Amino acid sequence: RISKIDELIKAKELEDAQAAKQAELKAKYDGVMSDANSLMIAADYAAAKAKYKEAQTIDNTQSLPGEKITEIEGILSNLEAEQKALEEAAALKKAYDEAITSANGLFDAGKLEAAKSAYNDAIAIDETQSFPKERVTAIDKQLAEQAAAKAKAAQIEDLLDEGAKLVSDEKFDDAKSVYLNILSIDPSNIEAEEQLSKVNKELALLKNDAEKEAAFTKLK
């Protein structure tokens, strides 16, 4: 009978010891989880993750620490993606700004072809921007105007050469037509005006000579 009582006492002591150990583990687990939750609220995710892992080592039967770790890993992944996007956007803006600065400098210096190329570089970097597209359109217009002016100047130069040769050959009527053509293209062309005036004088002299000769012939 005494032996039976001793067994019951030992069983109770063992039960109490196990209960005390469980209570101690629970208290430790709860304390670590409380720290982890506080770190989570403070957005100190790396430290919170470490605490949740510590809680798992204290009581690996609990699912909450693992769930929290998964949640943190998702948050950290999103934050990393956001940071990468910000860095890429900053790099894009830097490259775009540098291209625009270079293009503006070339444009202001009148180097239109080089400026157009630089503005196209900026468009390739960020095609959502309207400014470089507007500048390319403006440059194309200026280049077209310059090409037209150059072609006009070349045409006038050729006509002036033609007119001079006709004057040299004393083909004054043809020369007059050429100089009138030049003035229709460029009304302010001084050389054409001067040459036309000379040609008109020559034609007037020729006409006067012809009239005198006709009058003289009539008297015969």
Image (tube, helix red, strand yellow):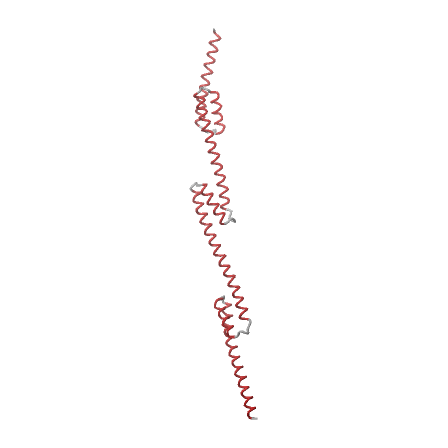
The one of 213 and 99 positioned closer to us in this rendering: 99
Expressed as whole percent of the image width and height from the top left, the position of residue 187 reads: 48, 28
Outermost residue toward the front in this view: 3
In the rendered view, tell whether residue 90 sits above or below residue 174: below
Expressed as whole percent of the image width and height from the top left, the position of residue 108 reads: 43, 42
Report the quarter where the N terminus lies.
bottom right
Outermost residue toward the bottom in this view: 1
In the rendered view, tell whether residue 56 sits above or below residue 186: below
| Figure disc tally | 0
In the rendered view, tell whether residue 14 sits above or below residue 140: below
The one of 46 and 93 positioned closer to us in this rendering: 46
Outermost residue toward the top in this view: 220
Expressed as whole percent of the image width and height from the top left, the position of residue 92 reads: 48, 52
Expressed as whole percent of the image width and height from the top left, the position of residue 185 reads: 49, 29
